[in-house]
Image (cartoon, grey):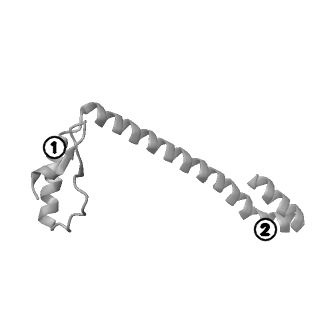
Amino acid sequence: GGSGNLKISKFGRPGAPTGGAAAPMASASTAESVAAAVAAAAGPVPQGEQEEARRMRSRQLWALATICLGIFSALSIWFSASAVLAPMTEKWGITDAQGSGQDGFVQW
């Protein structure tokens, strides 16, 4: 085996090994040296790609935070309505059907 069994893609990055047979399991030191060679061949990530990755990550975090806030808000309203249902039933004489209707209305 040697340095000639990696195919370089049109972007100058290593591709899949050439040849049809499966390679035997490599030792940890071999895997580390291959990883270092791949990283060296790939070179540094261009600044534009780093900035785009940061912007994408920021958008993803904002989307996640918005979804979490929306779910938390919806569940807090439902929880509050469910928590006061039993005292309302006792104090105002609400029937089970009316209580179920109020719970269903809050969930809707």
- The answer to which of 62 and 38 lies nearer the viewer is 38
- The answer to which of 30 and 8 lies nearer the viewer is 8
Q: What residue type is labelled 1?
A: Ala
SS under mark 2: helix
In this view, the residue farthest toward the left is: 2
Residue drawn where x is 20% and y is 67% of the image: 24
Q: In which quarter of the image is residue 95?
A: bottom right
What is the number of the mark on residue 41?
A: 1
Visible in this render: residue 94? no
Residue 43 coordinates in the image, percent (x, y): 17, 40
Visible in this render: residue 91? yes
Residue 77 relative to residue 54: left or right: right
Residue 68 coordinates in the image, percent (x, y): 54, 50
- The answer to which of 34 and 102 lies nearer the viewer is 34
Q: Which amino acid does label 2 sit on?
A: Ala
Residue of label 2:
86
- Please say if 105 is above or below 88: above
